[in-house]
Amino acid sequence: MASFLVFSSLPYTVSAESPRVQEPAYAKWGRLAVFETGKRYPDYDIVDYLYVGRTTVQNEDIVERFKLWIRKGASEKGVIITITLTPNGVFKGISFQETAR
């Protein structure tokens, strides 16, 4: 009985690409929240970011909420950013509310 080994002249390659991670749906609005907070509080550093969540209000508008922690020297405060979108996801408005810890 004979055994045969066949070697291909084509190079064997292994792809080390990692699977693409899909960006969360709120990421676009999170970037807007960070950008607008930076404009509103230019002397503060943003030190923390939290996505609070998405809700739908009675008129079917979508509300995305974020909480950013900002610091200027020894002064720190939280800022709740509320972004309102139409039912089909078009930007409608943004509001800021300062909070204590």
Image (cartoon, helix red, strand yellow):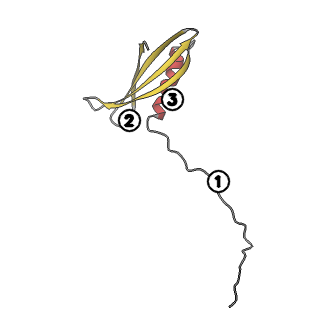
Residue that numbered label 2 is attached to: 89
Separation of disc 2 and disc 1 at Cα?
A: 36 Å
Nearest the camera: 76 or 4? Answer: 4
Residue that numbered label 1 is attached to: 16
- Name the mark nearer the viewer: 2 or 3: 3
Does dot 3 land on a helix, a strand or a loop? helix
**Mark 1 packing: few (<14 Cα in 10 Å), some, or many (20+)?**
few
Separation of disc 3 and disc 1 at Cα?
A: 30 Å
Residue that numbered label 3 is attached to: 31
Task: State the image quarter where residue 58 is shown.
Answer: top left
Nearest the camera: 41 or 4? Answer: 4
Q: Quadrant of the N terminus?
A: bottom right
Q: Where in the figure is residue 19, as x and y percent of width and height?
A: 56, 50
Q: Earlier in the sequence, mark 2 or mark 3?
A: 3
Q: In the visual, does 79 lie left or right of 60?
A: right
- Name the mark nearer the viewer: 3 or 1: 1
